[in-house]
Amino acid sequence: MTHNLLVVDDEPKLCDLLSSALSQNGIQVFTASNGLHALKVLEQEDIDLVISDWRMPGMDGPQLLAEIKQRYPQLPVIVMTAYSTVKNAVQSMRNGAYDYIAKPFDIDELDITVSKALQFRDILKDNQRMRAELEEQQQFDSLVGDSPAFRRVLQAVDSVRESSATILLTGESGTGKEMVARAIHKHGNRADKPFVAVNCAAIPEGLLESEMFGHRKGAFTGAVADRVGRFQQADKGTLFLDEVGDMPLALQAKILRALQERVIEPVGDPRERKVDVRVIAATNKNLLEAVANKEFREDLYYRLNVFPIPLPALRERVEDIALLARHFAHSLGATAGKRISGFSPEALQAMASYAWPGNIRELQNCVERATIVASGQVIEETDLPGYLFGSQPQGAEAGTSISVGPQVPSDLDAALAEVEKAYILAALHQSNGVQAAAAQMIGISERSFWYRLKKLGIQVDKIVR
Ligand SMILES: Nc1ncnc2c1ncn2[C@@H]1O[C@H](COP(=O)(O)OP(=O)(O)OP(=O)(O)O)[C@@H](O)[C@H]1O
Ligand SMILES: [Mg+2]
């Protein structure tokens, strides 16, 4: 590797001497007679190391050092001082010089100092390059997946991240909607501004308006102080409207106005405020169906659906299961202080043929459990939760074929019962056996859930969790 070196000294003789002494070792030497001149050379050439005199007319060594540290913080500087007082040397080191050398000096001594400094420079450059490469590789950092279905998502994310277009993320629970929303924000041009997430389903209806738009002190009982709403918090940044399909109709009208006119009105305050937010909305509901059922405003639907990104269910990207499982095993294993090297072929097979109704979140929980249970470095079939096998083989295949496969069961009712059982077991697993929560998760009443348990012969207390 060749290096470019800049010698700064008002003494032409010394510049010449250093030039010829150092040029021999694959180093090209540039010279400058003062600080200002040196800065010019630095602008034009890709310099790896500066050797500068301390006392110079005009811009002296300390001033040049300060300039360099500011403009090129990664560039090492060696300071030469004729007044070999410790004071100068210490001061230069404190101001960020890489090293110093006292005049008069021996060329061999200088050679050693220079090659050490160049090695240091090379390491810095390597680190920078590796970091840049790593960033490129992990373009959307934690978004793991390489299947065609997921690549389409990544392409969509890439094409829209730098705009301020409204995005609608749709997909089943646990498919990564929030993660994708954060990735879009992080890699867009609002990245240094806030990302504010609102879960429209989690906030009581009566509080939603004030949560979104803020309120004035005294606007209603309990409004003891002014409050800034989420829209304003997200000003210049991104507002993530999660579970947007669960927003009450009354609020939908107000949100629509805010999106159309880019102004908001805090509760109890008639003065409008301008807001500049990029909206990313997400839902696991079928919004068109909700529109048809008059649960969701059609005009708001079109306002949000400017750039839809549908997230595939995990069973539609079976190729990614092993990749994701390894990713989780490594990261979760590391947190648990365990080194997991991978999965047995049987374990991979079992995961690949399960339907994953809870998608990536369910896979993550499953792998987390397995890393804890596993006695060795490899996760075996027996480390996986029993419910993965509850539906095998027909259930898992039927689960897959619901959306993609042309496989036809020989006994439809039996196959449907297997699928039903697999989903119910998965819901029970995810809810830690709480039936009410499991019922809610799959959108049926507790009564109907209980009825199905009986019909399918599922004994909740016998489920291995
Ligand atoms: N592509 C991915 N790579 C790695 N991890 C992922 C990926 N997508 C999602 N995850 C992980 O899966 C879990 C679920 O993701 P997330 O919360 O984004 O899903 P969601 O669609 O918002 O779910 P819900 O509808 O239930 O809110 C998170 O822990 C997330 O870290
Ligand atoms: Mg979510």
Image (cartoon, rainbow, N blue to C red):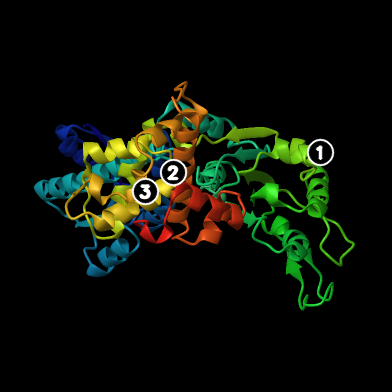
Q: Can residue 5 be seen in this view?
A: no
Q: Where is residue 275 in the image (x, y as percent from the top left)?
A: 76, 52
Q: Which amino acid does label 2 sit on?
A: Ala
From the viewer's side, name the closer residue of 33 and 46: 46
Picture residue at 23% right of the left edge, 32% below the top:
2
Callout 1 touching callout 2 (CB < 8 Å): no
> What type is the residue that disc 3 sits on?
Tyr
The residue that label 3 is drawn on is 387
| Residue found at x 87% / y 65% | 269
x and y percentages locating residue 10 in the rendered image: 32, 47
Q: Distance between the residues labelled 2 and 3?
A: 7 Å
Residue 256 appears in the figure? yes
Of labels 1 and 2, the one closer to you:
2
Quickly name the residue at label 1. 299
- Give the crowd class for mark 2: few <14, some 14-19, many >=20 residues within 10 Å: many
Three-letter amino acid code at disc 1?
Asp
Sequence order check, earlier mark of 3 and 1: 1
* Residue underneath mark 2: 422
Q: In the structure shown, which secondary structural element does the residue marked by tag 2 occupy?
A: helix
Q: Is residue 298 left or right of residue 183?
A: right
